[in-house]
C-alpha cells in the first residue's frame, strides 16, 4: 500500500510517500496512527498529536475506526483551512 504525506507532516517525516506493508495488527486508521510514531523520531514528531491528523483512505476522508486493511493508498495531512 502507498502512504502519502502532505504539508508539514511531509516536512517532518522527511519524504512525501512510501510503499509499505502494514503489520497484521494495524487494521484501522487509529491503529495506523498509533503504530507510525514507533517507526522513528521523525514519525513521532510529525504524529505527536494524532487527533489533529486528517486521514484519507483511497481518497476519502476517514474516521479513526475506518478499515485500512484493503486500502491501496492512505494519505495523512494536517487540518485544512479555507480562505
Image: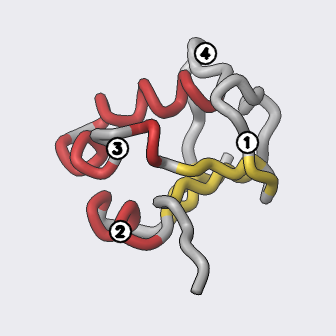
Q: How many labels, in total?
A: 4
Distance Cα–Cα, label 1 vs label 2: 20 Å
Q: Quadrant of residue 30?
A: top right
Circle nearer the N terminus (4, 1): 4
Image quadrant of residue 22?
A: top right
Query: Callout 3: 10 Å neighbours few (<14), some, many (20+)?
Result: many
> Which residue is at a point 61% across and 56% down the rendered structure image?
75
Locate residue 66, reporting x and y percent.
75, 29
Badge 4 or badge 3: first in the primary sequence: 4
Q: Give the spatial CA distance, label 4 vs label 2.
A: 28 Å
Residue receiving disc 1: 62
In terms of secondary structure, where does tag 4 sit? loop
Quarter of the picture holding the C terminus: bottom right
Query: Circle 4 sits on which residue?
Result: 24
The alpha-carbon separation of the residues under discs 4 and 3 comes to: 21 Å
Residue 70: mark in rendering: none
**Position of residue 36 in the picture relative to residue 83 (left or right):** left
**Residue ID at (34%, 44%):** 47
Residue picked out by circle 2:
8
Pointer 1 or 2: first along the chain: 2
Eye-nearest disc, 4 or 3: 3
Amino acid at each position: 500500500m502507498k502512504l502519502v504525506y502532505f504539508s508539514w507532516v511531509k516536512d517532518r517525516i522527511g519524504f512525501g510517500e512510501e510503499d509499505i506493508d502494514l503489520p497484521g495488527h494495524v487494521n484501522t486508521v487509529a491503529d495506523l496512527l498509533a503504530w507510525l510514531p514507533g517507526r522513528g523520531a521523525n514519525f513521532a514528531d510529525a504524529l505527536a498529536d494524532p487527533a489533529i491528523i486528517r486521514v484519507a483512505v483511497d481518497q476519502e476522508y476517514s474516521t479513526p475506526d475506518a478499515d485500512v486493511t484493503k486500502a491501496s493508498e492512505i494519505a495523512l495531512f494536517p487540518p485544512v483551512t479555507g480562505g
